[in-house]
Image: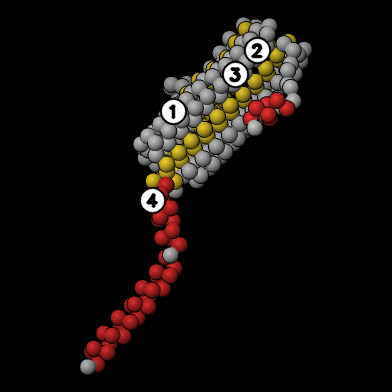
Amino acid sequence: MINVLEYFRPGAHLEPGIDSSAFIEPGATVSEESYVGPHCVICKNTEIKAGAVLRANVYVGNGSSVGKGSRIEPGVVIYNDCSIGDECVLHSGSVIGAEGFGFIPDGEGEPRKIPQIGGVRIGNKVEIGACTTIDRGTIGNTVIGNGVKIDNHVQVGHNVKVGNNCIIVAQTGLAGSSILEDNVIMAAKSGTSDHVRVGKGSTVAALGGVIKDISPGSVVSGFPARDHRKNFKIAALLQKLPSLFDRVKKLEKEYVAIRENDNDK
């Protein structure tokens, strides 16, 4: 089926070149074999490698790079000091390298911003969905491994490390400094708290919330995330709570009646 769909997919080949409306600062390196579309902005010290395609209205910040054969769709923002690997796809509205959400109260209780001076490093053959955001690191880098596939509307916090070939489905949130080892699947609307590790080959089911480390090969669900079978059993028992409550109330009444009858005797 995949082979058939690829055969019938409309071609999107663009001849290399730079649109006249694009703005490229001195000091940027743009391959002659790349395509830079209308109204793109490429800042100094950046590198756009051979075969890369920047559709339109793409911003690439100072010191960033776009790898060979990567496709950057309209409206993508790549902040300073971010690297995009080879053969990646970044869909419209995605933002790479915005400042991570870091604040601490000052002496008067007002939130004080923690400078975010790290970057973002994205591996090869990564696909990032529309309106997904990947924050830059506080000191080190936020890292996305090779072959990672990220759906639309995903939030990746600062200093997160995502291993190779992970799948992250829509509306998932990864809090700062959390780690996904290789081949992890995060289903829709799942999430991790900060500084937790999800072991290699694990699956977090939809709406699952990971608040402590998950061992490799686990399948977890619920909040807090626990073994999937155990969570299903708990969910099934919760459905029986109303009838169990009624049975307990009935037993209480029967017990009171027996006690009163004994006292009368």
Q: Position of residue 216 (x, y in %)?
A: 37, 34
- Picture disc at residue 39: none
Q: Nearer the viewer, residue 14 or 22?
A: 14
What residue did someone put label 1 on? 182
**Image quadrant assignment for residue 69:** top right
SS at badge 4: helix
On screen, 201 above or below 34? Answer: below
Q: Position of residue 219 (x, y in %)?
A: 42, 41
Q: Is residue 36 left or right of residue 139?
A: right
Q: Amino acid at mark 3?
A: Glu
> Earlier along the polypeptide chain: callout 2 or callout 1?
2
What residue did someone put label 2 on? 51
- Picture disc at residue 230: 4
CB under 8 Å between callouts 3 and 1? no
- Picture disc at residue 87: 3
Callout 3 environment at 10 Å: few (<14), some (14 to 19), or many (20+)?
some
Q: CA separation, marks 3 and 1?
A: 19 Å
Q: CA separation, marks 2 and 3?
A: 9 Å
> Earlier along the polypeptide chain: callout 2 or callout 3?
2
Q: Amino acid at mark 2?
A: Gly
SS at badge 1: loop
Q: CA separation, marks 2 and 1?
A: 28 Å
